Image (cartoon, grey):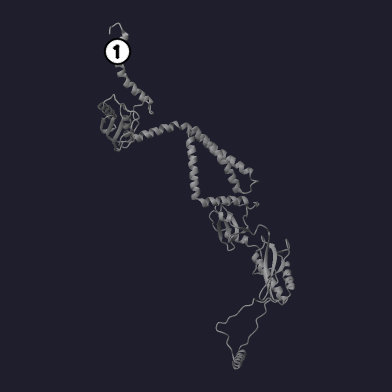
Amino acid sequence: MTPGNPGRRLRRAAPALFSRTFPALALLALALLSPAGPSAAQEGTAPQAGPSDPPRSVSVRPAARDDAIAGRIESILQATGWYTDIRVDATDGVVFIDGVTGRDEHRTWARSLAANTQDVAAVVNRIAVDPQIDWSFAPAIAEIRSLVRTAWASLPLLALALVILPLAFYAAALVGRLVEWALRRQIPSPFLRRVMARTVSIPVFLIGLYIVLQVAGLTQLALSIVGGAGVAGIIVGFAFRDIAENFLASLLLSIRQPFRRGDFIQVGDQEGTVQSMNTRSTLLLSREGNHIQIPNAAVFKSTIVNFSAAAARQDYLDVGIGYDVSIDAAQEIVRQVLTGHAAVLQEPEEPLVLVNSLGSATVNLRAYFWFDGQAYSVFKIRSALLRLVKKALTDAGVSMPDEAREVIFPQGVPVLTIDEKVTGAAASGHASDRTETSAPAALTESGASATMSEGDLDNDTDALARHAAAAEIPEAGQDLLSDDTRRL
């Protein structure tokens, strides 16, 4: 080959050049065509001791020696000052790290450092974590300084909140009062008006709170609080299910108004005059003067009998007459007694005297009559009418026999002979001679509409209420009923 012929020199040097560059080109093509791409660094391994995940690409001919890799990693770890007794070994690209550190984050950082070092195929992280107790107050002081800086930066937002939140509160209160004033005629119950007013006023305050949180950049916190409040509400609802049930029942009872204060009602087996109703129970005053508190849920679910819903109330009397008496004559006598009494009403219907049943010894009559239940006591009227009916039937000669009874003598009936009867009669005669008997004085039946024992026949509800007013009843001051509320 001559110096002046460059083409011949290129042909002679081409085989040697191809032999040197072909392996490098093959490795480059393999790296580009692999799924992991051309990356030669290994991904981070798990914190626990053990080899890292196999690398996605490993160089066949690493450029860096194992001792160089180990020395470089060990020098970096020692420079941080985070590790003690640190030692790094490398064999065929696998790095073994031994030592002690005080934090788990430093252990993870050492593994990441080794995995990202050139020509490292795998990492075995055997660094032990030995937490150190730091008695220094420097972290606490730094945290306090950070809080002070944050609070100082939040002063404008705090001032804005101090302005917006009171305005939102007063705006909500004003809206609630306006709603309660507007509904004073449509909704007569004060409790329902307050519930409606709060239903409208609470969203007004929540809008002001949302504005403050939005300006402060705490919208996500607000959503988290609302979500947590919803979950907490479900938990509290299950825990206080009875309380919530009674509250809803009081709300529904206030809407329907099946009774008012002062009404005499029957709820299940309990009877009494309604004194008050709160968000938990309804208070009744029994005829004996006892206070009865019934949960509103039980009141709402039970059958309610309101004896005071209408002024006119019907009652009846049962009278038994003998079979030898004219039934229509006895009916007329009883009817005249009922019609002539001042407490008996002629409307909506005059008194009726009907044959109720045929007994073993009597014909049983039932007399129906109406009276003013708000003005008179049913017990007193029944007593007066029974007394007058008995007097009228007795004066007319109407017999009222007792029901036939079967008399059983367990020891049998003694049988006396004639001599024993004569002896007994003689002894009785001598005893009559020694003792003078006098017949009892005849007692006349009163024909007055009411006797001194029966009183004035007035309803005693007011008297019971006056006597029970001195008693201290818990929750009696909170009353959801009103005297002027009309039933729906």
Percent of width and height locating residue 324: 72, 77
Label 1's element?
helix
Which corner quadrant of the image does residue 139 belong to?
Answer: top left
Q: Residue furthest bottom?
A: 419
- Position of the N terminus, as image quadrant, is top left
Residue 290 is situated, as x and y percent measured from the top left of the image, at 56, 61
382 or 406, which is in the foreground? 406
Residue at x-position 67% and y-position 68%: 317
User: Considering depth in this image, is 352 or 275 the residue closer to the camera?
Assistant: 352
Given the image, on which type of amino acid does mark 1 rest? Arg
Q: Position of residue 67 (x, y in %)?
A: 25, 27
409 with respect to 392 (left or right): left
Q: Position of residue 102 (x, y in %)?
A: 30, 36
**Residue 160 sits above or below residue 332 on the image:** above
The residue pinned by badge 1 equals 12
The residue sitting at 55% across, 41% down in the picture is 202
Q: Residues within 10 Å of mark 1 (few under 14, many from 20)?
A: few
> Which residue is at a point 50% across and 32% down the rendered structure image?
215
Q: Above or below — where is 305 with respect to 418?
A: above
Which one is in front, 33 or 281? Answer: 33
The image quarter containing residue 76 is: top left
Q: How many marks?
A: 1
Q: Outermost residue toward the top?
A: 4
Q: Say which residue appears at 31% left-offset and 11% top-offset.
A: 10
